[in-house]
Image (spheres, rainbow, N blue to C red):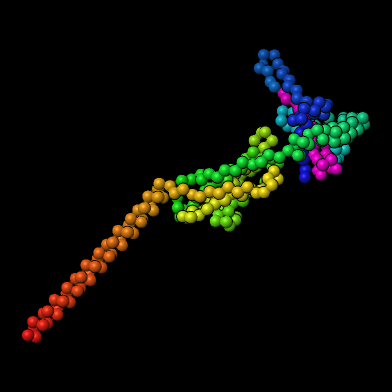
Amino acid sequence: MTFCLDLRMCGVSVRVVSVLLTLSVCLCSSPPEDFVYQSKGQCYYRNGTDNVRLLVRYISNQEEFVYFDSEVGFFIAKNEWGKPDADNWNSQKETVERYRAEVDTVCRHNYQSVKPYTVDRKSQPNVKIVNTKTLDLEHENLITCFVDGFFPPMIKVTWLKNGIEEGEQVTSSELLPNGDWTFEIHVMLETTIKHGDTFTCQVEHSSLQQPVSVNWEPDVSDSARNKMLTGIVGFVLGSIFIIVGLVVYLRSKKTMTRFSVVQNENLMS
């Protein structure tokens, strides 16, 4: 597992972290302009603290111009105007050694303090199914499974139709951060719906002892219900007309046969 810790979020007071300066410069009668200078310290953990990487990034007006990478061991310029800073800092042995040491003094040192509410933190997902179109039998419908409030972000969402997993007709949104260390995802199923169909959204997540399954049975819309009733009424009326017509036809045929027999008897007498 790879875990990234942005130390700005943890309240750690170290030089490499949480530097945000806003400079307002007024030139003559011109309106003031804002210049934002930031440094961000990010610790990446692979397999706990066995493999730790430190990135210290320097950004001016949302453009990164130089950074320190502990896996390389020195400063790297991102553009031309970051090159003088990179060359200057790399020439200072004490500065480079201090940054290299912060893999231990900052990243490994703070790992245990943030591990309980980052690596070990688990939040169970909430699952809800919504039909995002008016239900129309025998035509394509779009059913969405909303899953939110879960952490960590790794999750598996599966659609089942009548107990059989759906694949080609399933699409998904990107993983959406909620801003509170939880995530959200929308998984859509486009399918035709018939009477008696059942749908299940199944969610597997590390916070759950077993998968959560939410079932959904379609409610027939007024339009679909009216169409169905019209079809039934039409079928019944059609059947009645056929039966009545058949009865009339048989009676007429029987009458004609009887009339023919009587007429033949009269001719013979």
Along the horizontal axis of the image, is 52 left or right of 194?
Answer: right
Query: Extreme front residue here?
Result: 209
| Residue sitting nearer the eye, 232 or 110 | 232
Residue 66 in view here: no
Quadrant containing the C terminus is bottom left
In the rendered image of this protein, does residue 74 appear above or below residue 264?
Answer: above
Along the horizontal axis of the image, is 115 left or right of 197?
Answer: right
Along the horizontal axis of the image, is 153 left or right of 106?
Answer: left
Quadrant containing the N terminus is top right
Tell me the quarter of the picture where residue 101 sits: top right
Along the horizontal axis of the image, is 72 left or right of 133?
Answer: right
Percent coordinates x, y for residue 13 in the rendering: 81, 26
| Residue sitting nearer the eye, 54 or 85 | 54
Percent coordinates x, y for residue 94 in the rendering: 92, 30
Residue at image x 71%, y 18%? 24
Residue at image x 68%, y 39%? 123
In the rendered image of this protein, does residue 167 appear above or below residue 5?
Answer: below
Tell me the quarter of the picture where residue 70 sits: top right
Q: Main secondary structure of the magenta part?
A: strand
Query: Extreme top residue here?
Result: 29
Percent coordinates x, y for residue 165 in the rendering: 60, 56
Residue at image x 32%, y 59%? 236
Query: Extreme bottom residue here?
Result: 268
Residue 49 magenta: yes
Tell me the quarter of the picture where residue 103 sits: top right
Q: Specify the segment rendered in magenta.
A: 35-55
In the rendered image of this protein, does residue 21 appear above or below residue 186?
Answer: above
| Residue sitting nearer the eye, 117 or 5 | 117
Residue 233 in view here: yes
Residue 172 magenta: no
Q: How many marks?
A: 0
Percent coordinates x, y for residue 52 in the rendering: 84, 40
